[in-house]
Image: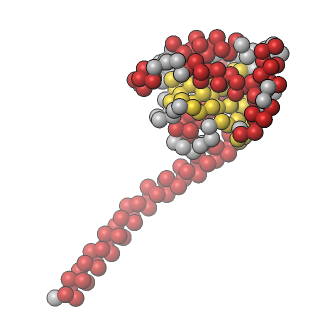
Amino acid sequence: MIKLTIVGRVSDGLPLAQGPRYTIEDYNKFLFYKQQAELILKEISKGALAHSKMTIHIDHHCFNHLVDNGIIFITLCDSSYPRKLAFHYLQDLQKEFEKFDNRLVEKITRPYSFVKFDSIIGNIRRQYINTRTQANLSKLNANRKQDVDIVTKHISEILERRQNAGEVHEIALKWTPITTIIVVTVVLLWASLDSQATS
């Protein structure tokens, strides 16, 4: 079952819209998964996750995301939910999103303030609740090679990469002043030796 959907902008990682809160029983779990989705959104906007289609496993769920035309569509599903249907859902969202004027989307500055799209997310989600409807079965059986180009990772890999990048950044910040002092000292020493040699 589809439990969470977030639509965001690639350029700055701003979450634009989210569907209604679904069936995640515990509000704290809902917040946890929402934070993880926002983290994925930020990682995509930084270029750390360069694939346009990806599945990211977390607990007994998975995030599926689709990046198209500068917009990210992310959904959280049970791990048993058919991945192919999840991507059909994201593609349907993407088709509906294309109907909006790009200038309107670019003007949005506050997170989750594109509420016009929230109800569209809810309407499209209803079509994907039951995986056994004739329409959904047709989608599952059509074009079976479609899943081949979808990269799969685990959230721990993303968090580890993010932590390593943060450590490298900290080291760079720590050593930059020292490196600058050494370089300036060497340049001044070289300049003074060069001026003495020419005198």
Residue 64 seen in the figure:
yes
Q: Is residue 94 above or below residue 133?
A: below
The front one of 15 and 182 is 15
Residue 154 seen in the figure:
no
Q: Position of residue 39 (x, y in %)?
A: 58, 35
Q: Position of residue 50 (x, y in %)?
A: 59, 43
Q: Position of residue 114 (x, y in %)?
A: 49, 18
Q: Is residue 32 above or below residue 153?
A: above
Q: Is residue 53 above or below residue 135?
A: below
Residue positioned 34% across, 67% down in the render: 181
Can you name the residue that lies furthest to the front here? 143
Residue 67 horizontal side relative to residue 141, left or right:
left
Quadrant (top left, top right, bottom left, bottom right) of the C terminus: bottom left
Give the image's coloring scheme. Answer: secondary structure
Residue positioned 41% across, 23% down in the render: 103
Kindly indicate the quadrant of the structure image that contains residue 123: top right
Quadrant (top left, top right, bottom left, bottom right) of the N terminus: top right
Residue positioned 40% across, 66% down in the render: 179
Can you name the residue that lies furthest to the left here? 199
Q: Position of residue 145 (x, y in %)?
A: 78, 35
Q: How many marks?
A: 0
The front one of 116 and 197 is 116
Kindly indicate the quadrant of the structure image that contains residue 175: bottom left
Kindly indicate the quadrant of the structure image that contains residue 80: top right
Q: Is residue 7 above or below residue 195?
A: above
